[in-house]
Amino acid sequence: MHMEIPRGSKRALLLLALLLLQPVAAGQMKLPITLFKLDNGPTLVISEDHTTPIFGLSVVYGVGFRLEPRGRTGFAHLFEHMMFEGTPNAPKGSFVKIIQGGGGSLNGSTRYDYTNYISTAPVSALEPVLWLEADRMRHLDFSRENLDNQRDVVKEEIRVNVKNRPYGLFFWTDLAALAFDKWENAHDGYGSFVDLDKATIEDVKHFHDTYYAPDNAVIAVSGDVDPEQVYRLVQKYFGDIPATPLPPRPDVSESLNTGERFERQTDAHATAPALAIGWKMPGPDSPDYYPLAVLGALLLDGDASLLYQKMVKERQTMLSISGGFGWPLGDPLTFAGPSLMVAFGIYKPGSPARQNVDDIQAVIDGIARDGVDPARLKAVQTKMVADFYKELARNINRADYLAITQKLHGDADLVNRYPQIIQAVTPDDIRRVAAKYLTVANRSWIDRQVASKKQGEQQP
């Protein structure tokens, strides 16, 4: 059972159910979930697991690539780095010293619809880590030195991961720019050197004041904890941080494309050509959302997938192919708006790019026409659920999924229902969504050719 404690409750702990992690049906598990709502806005999600004396913590803020300011592409990503630069009370390095010093780990990431900060450590470290998280929600060390330092770090990431690496991230950034129409969905969230250089201390302060507010956050804790005790700690450290009115969320919805989009590129670092194909997907409010996720796994998840078997094993015109729904930036639980179904593969030199794309489309058209073998579908669904449970086995991942689903979907219990949702997808669902979404008209693709030596020498 899933419950939200109403705003203003003194105790805030009316436990209708605290279920231990236990089977609820054959092959299914149910996480215990307790929710609280603090008066200044943040939601607290707690899941008890007394198996080991550790905790997982995730603090998720409702800001990602889609919400960063125009003219500041990559700013949400830059700010993720800024959050590790310390505060007037906790100098840079405090998080690492406390968490890693006790044998734990920590990380942060930026996605389309959120930025998350995750950590895991022995339960003895929970209180100081909560204090640190509240401290950097309250204020940061907004110095020119810190801004310049982290701006350089992000720019170096772009050099390493985009500019000087075979294929870069064209299967994400360039493909999104080609497929989407709205700036929020289409711009390069990883970052632009020009826009990053424009960022000022005032920009950083305004971004923090606007989005890193308690009423834009969800805090989730999973592990060897008592919900009432965790609530008291969160109330103690987060409860008096002032709430801030959030700006209206832009409308990021898009219609399906009505004509094929194509772009040819060259790559100075690649030794074989590559393809990236994207079909525009709806947001999570669509009844087709989860069937499309299953279709993505059926087509692209692993060596047993239909497209790997067809293109790599049977036709032998491609060296690799992978992707899926929302790939490479998430899964169905981690989007609050439209995404792409992506197929990325390296193909053999001399093999025509258009023929490879046509052969991929032929597999999809066959599903739209004839459906899918129920036994194969069941095997894919079983693997999806097993992979999901494997993720949930770690408290840090469990806390993160609970925080993300509560923030993006308003429903942490979606984590419990997700396996059943996936298993409920039928062959008719698969055929329907393949015919509706994975069409030539809704297809965007990039052919990334190996640059000639002369071309490569001319590139910056």
Image: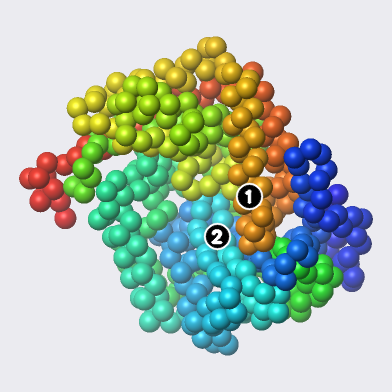
361 up-or-down from 173: above or below:
above
User: Where does label 1 land, which residue?
Assistant: 390
Residue at (56%, 85%) from the top-left corner? 90
Q: Residues within 10 Å of mark 2 (few under 14, many from 20)?
A: many
Q: Specify the amino acid type for callout 1.
A: Lys
Query: Crowding near pointer 1: few (<14 within 10 Å), some, many (20+)?
Result: few
Q: Which residue is mark 2?
A: 115
Identify the residue shown where x is 62% and y is 52%: 391
Q: Secondary structure at mark 1?
A: helix
Q: Which quarter of the picture shows residue 217? A: bottom right
For image coordinates 72% across by 67% down, the residue present is 52
Query: Cα distance, mark 2 to mark 1?
Result: 23 Å
Identify residue type, mark 2: Thr
Q: Is residue 95 visible?
A: no
Q: Spot the residue most to the left.
A: 454
Q: Are marks 2 and 1 in contact (CB under 8 Å)?
A: no
Residue 312 shows up from this direction: yes
Query: How far across and down, in percent of the image, does residue 85 sit?
Result: 47, 78
